[in-house]
Every structure is written in structure tokens, then in C-alpha cells.
Amino acid sequence: DLHHLPLCRVLRRLLLMERQLDSLNKKTLNRNSVVLRLAVSAFALTAFCIIAYKVSLGNTETFDRKVSEIVYSFRNSFTKSIFVPWTYLGNAVIVISAIGIATVIPKTRWSIGVPTALTGTVTFALYKFLKYSFARPRPEEVFHLIQQGGFSFPSGHSMNGLFCYGMIIFLIRRNCSDKTTANCLTAIGSIMIMGIGFSRIFVGVHYPTDVAGGFLLGLACLMPATLGIDKVHYNFRK
């Protein structure tokens, strides 16, 4: 038994070192994740400001017209049957309903519903403020496939769609233990978000720069929101 004492001490020491190394690796990964998300948010916000500045000066008209014409060229009875309904996935009623369902269901109430509702409310208020600040008219009604009032920049459907559905994707990946399911839902959510942006141009109620601005602003808000949720979750578990 005496011969085994040094070996036991070595094994305990190795186990302790392994735990310390694992803890250090997690802290490093968390630090890198924070830096990456803040960098993405800063890039998206900077890009949004550049687009907003050019829109305010009227320097995007040629670009918007050419891209819109390309998108309109895809219009036919089949594509209309897809993208006209698709555009409503970004409506406030649909987004609020999806968050409401997640809030009502006990299993997803605190993991998905409540965090998305709280952060989404702040983002929605920001979008409304910017919408009336820029007061950009929508494309001419002759291009509209649906009825849509209000101003054009930034696209609220694109911004709120990316933020809210992006937040749901983030929370699913945080809470879903099945990687295959998480990856499938991530792919579906990503296609849904991109489709909403494309559909806003397709139905003629937004310019391409409206959609780009909405996506960038949504991304700029999403990144720090995920950091806040991670921080709250960490402190709660702690």
C-alpha cells in the first residue's frame, strides 16, 4: 500500500491539472466568443451607418433601381405564390405570435420565450424611432404586390425577422442537446430570415438598401443581446 501512495498523489495532481486546464480553456473560449460577437456587432453597426448616410444623401438610387429590376424579373405566378405569403413571416403579428407560443409553452418559456420577448421589445422600439427619423418614401405603388403603408428605411421586417428569429436560433442552439435537430432548425431559420429580406424587395415595398440596413441593424442588436443573455444565464447558474 505504501508503494501506491506516490502514484495516487500523481494521479490526483494530474486530475487537478486537467480540471484547471479545462476551466482555462472554457474561459478562453468564452473570452474569444465575447470579442467575436462585439466585433461583428461593431462591423454591422458601422456598415449600417454608411448605408444610412448614403441613403440620406440619395446616393443609392441607381443601385436600388438596378437590383430591384433584377428581383422583379423573377416575378411570375409560381414565385408570387411563394414570396407573397413568405413576406408576412416578418410581420409583427407573426413574430409576436411565435414568441408568444414559446412563452406559453412551459419547456420553452424561460429558455426561449421570455428572453426573446424582452430583447425584441427594445429592438422594435429602436426600429420605430429610426423609421420615422429617416422618413424615406417607399418605392412607387405601381411596383407593390401587397398593400403597405409607412416609411421604407430601414426594413422592419428584415430587422425584426433577423433579430427575433436569430435570437430563437441562438437559444435553440444553447438549449437543444441534439446537435442534428439544432442544425436543422438553424438551417430552416436562416432560410426563413433570408427569404423575408428577399421577399420585401420582391413584393415591391422596399429598396435593397432598406433590407440591407434592416439586416445589419438587426445583427448589430442581436450580438450584444446574446451576450447579455449568456451573462444572465451564467450568473443565475452561479
Image (cartoon, helix red, strand yellow):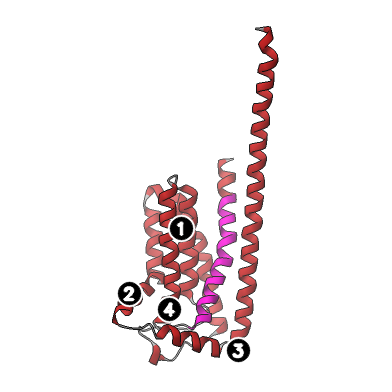
Mark in front: 1 vs 4 = 4
Seen as rendered, the residue at the extreme top is: 1
Question: Which badge, 2 or 1, comes first in the chain's sequence?
Answer: 2
Given contact means CB atoms under 8 Å apart, are the residues at marks 3 and 4 in contact? no
| 210 falls in the magenta region | yes
Q: Which mark is residue 200?
A: 4
The amino acid pointed to by label 1 is Ile
- In three-dimensional space, the C-alpha distance between marks 3 and 2, rounded to whole angstroms, equals 32 Å
Residue position for label 3: 59
Mark 2: which amino acid? Answer: Ile
Residue 144: image location, x then y, percent: 38, 87
Q: Nearer the viewer, mark 2 or mark 4?
A: 2
Residue 81 vertical position relative to residue 118 in the rendered view, above or below: below
- The quadrant of the rendering that contains the N terminus is top right
Question: What secondary structure is the magenta-colored segment mainly?
Answer: helix
Task: Please say if 169 is above or below 58.
Answer: above
Residue position marked by numbered label 1 in the rendering: 168
Q: Which of the two marks, 1 or 3, is nearer to us in this view?
A: 3
Part of the protein shown in magenta: 207-231
Find the distance from the CA under tag 1 to the CA under tag 4. 21 Å
Q: Nearer the viewer, residue 165 or 201?
A: 201
Mark 3 is surrounded, within 10 Å at the Cα level, by few (under 14), some (14 to 19) or many (20 or more) other residues, namely: few
The residue wearing badge 2 is 82
Density class for disc 1 (Cα within 10 Å; few <14, some 14-19, many ≥20) is many
Task: Please report whichever mark, 1 or 4, sits nearer to the chain's N-terminal start.
Answer: 1
Whichever of callouts 3 and 2 sits on the residue coming sooner in the sequence is 3
